[in-house]
Image: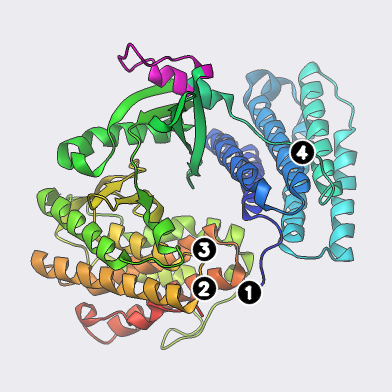
Amino acid sequence: MRQQTVTPDALIFLFLELQKQVQWLLKGLQNNAPESINKSQTRTAYINNYLNQLGAELATLSQPISWAQLGFHGQQASQQISTLARLAQSKSVKIEASKARLKSLKNTLSLTDSLLQSLIETLKQPGTPVTSVNRVKSQLHQLELFSVKQPDTINEYKLTLCLAQLTAQLSQLAERITHLQVGIHSQPEQLRAVQATLAQIESDTLSTDTNEFQLETLAHTKSGCVISKVAAQHEPGAPLGVVKQGQRIKIKQEKNQFARWQDYAPDLVPDLYGYHRDGDQAALFVEFLDGIRLDHWLTQAKPKGYLASLALVCERLESLWLNQSKPLPKEGASGFMPQLDARLNDVWHVHANFKKEWHQLGALKGIKLRQLIKQAHKLEQELMPQKHYFCHGDLNLDNVLFRPDDQQIFLVDLHRSGYHDYLQDIAVLMVSHFRLQVYDTEHRQLIGQSMRQLYQFAQNFADSQGDPFIHPRLALGLARSFITSTRFVLDETHARALFDRGRLLLTLLLDYASIKDPADFRIDTEIFYGPY
């Protein structure tokens, strides 16, 4: 039997995002880079998202009070870091704060980064070694020393007070790792967003009073958005629609994509009812689609008819691509390898040990992963398709709905839609199958069959389009998705299975292309099965 993670995944991801928030702020201060400080601020939406996920799981967890309080203190620490970022960006602080005070702030953030790393390592382990506890106590003591320095000006006082409050929250995290009180996060801004978007719908019977309808959380996206079903209090079984609330830039991107989908394939996406923005947050109110997500269907005990539904997805994608394509832009395309390279630090942030290990396979012995990516990108530039096709852009299983009654397919989470290599959608969809954390033989067999079916579909479409490099380019797309997917998987064994397959594909392709025509390369479908 597999060893289960003791700490809820949502809580560990919350602390990983908190650590990113600290690291981006520290980088911004060290390099005088406002864009890095702004990136630090964007992590708060992800932290709130993971706190909501944790809250939704509490009823199924042992020691729910302890986990809830950990999440609460993590969010409170995030708020203090956001305040520090705003203070650091204010002109008055930049003028008044002494070099010594700013150096102290940077030292404090560096210590906070180290402390969070220790806490994350502790949470990942079933037991807490004495050495780990002592290290945390030592780091806390150093933080407390920094937080008691006397300020000289009012702005330095604000910084000192904020640092002291941050230290207090981190102290709570460290000291109450298993004995904490309940603290569940709510999002009143969601209710305001629903009220505002409902107000845009012309209806004499629909009230916009938030007391007259209810929200039921459906999902939390990896991009930090919350998706909720909206229904009237007196008729909860008849949903009015779905509200998606999150960072304004992402929500606005999705709003813009809705118009394109309504032109290209209106029956594949929900209707858009309204849009509302509030500061750096925004919300979309869209049609409620009564269907089952493909990941939910596939992980059922007996997922009968799944391959037939997947064939229907392929049929709809092919129809869309054939009707919406355009020549490759003159400046070319970035390809899969730059995407992989850009996300590698996020992978190592979750799985630091992956950075230390490199495999020796074939003729490319001892080559570090970044060097493999660099070589693969050079090859990739010779494999580009002649056309780009209108794609979903993030075609994970949880973004595809199937309605069995009328055999209808729907696509959601549209903000990354655009003209891409069609293998973008294929690679993401294939690896989202493999990433599913189900391990019985029947499900892993079905996952492998599904990936083979998608591979065959891609090959057939490539033949119809005269695309000779489908196999090596898909290998690069799969490698990208296998490796980057590990940042969403805490289970070390499963993440290793993903990571190793991605690296193996890069190694085999480069090894093959060094002596033969890359167009003749073929992917060994055995890698679709497993994961071990």
Position of 381 with respect to 133 (left or right) is left
Amino acid on which the number 1 mark rests in the picture:
Arg
Q: Along the polypeptide, which appears first: circle 1 or circle 2?
A: 1
Q: Secondary structure at mark 2?
A: loop
Residue 368, horizontal then vertical, whole percent: 50, 74
Q: Which residue is mark 4?
A: 182
Q: Along the polypeptide, which appears first: circle 4 or circle 2?
A: 4
Answer few, some or many: residues within 10 Å of disc 4's Cα (few below 14, many 20 plus, some between 14 and 19).
some
Q: Which residue is mark 2?
A: 439
Residue drawn 76% across the image and 65% down it: 126
Residue 37, horizontal then vertical, whole percent: 58, 35
Q: Which residue is mark 1?
A: 2
Magenta-colored span? 193-211
Q: Nearer the viewer, residue 58 or 140?
A: 58
Amino acid on which the number 2 mark rests in the picture:
Tyr
Residue drawn 15% across the image and 65% down it: 461
Q: Is residue 404 above or below residue 95?
A: below
Residue 380, horizontal then vertical, whole percent: 28, 67
Residue drawn 16% across the image and 41% down it: 264
Q: CA distance from mark 4 to mark 1?
A: 30 Å
Q: Which residue is mark 3?
A: 486
Q: Secondary structure at mark 4?
A: loop
Q: Along the polypeptide, which appears first: circle 3 or circle 2?
A: 2
Q: Along the polypeptide, which appears first: circle 1 or circle 3?
A: 1
Disc 1 + disc 2, Cβ < 8 Å: yes
Residue 136, horizontal then vertical, whole percent: 84, 54
Q: Along the polypeptide, which appears first: circle 4 or circle 3?
A: 4
Residue found at the far top of this picture: 204
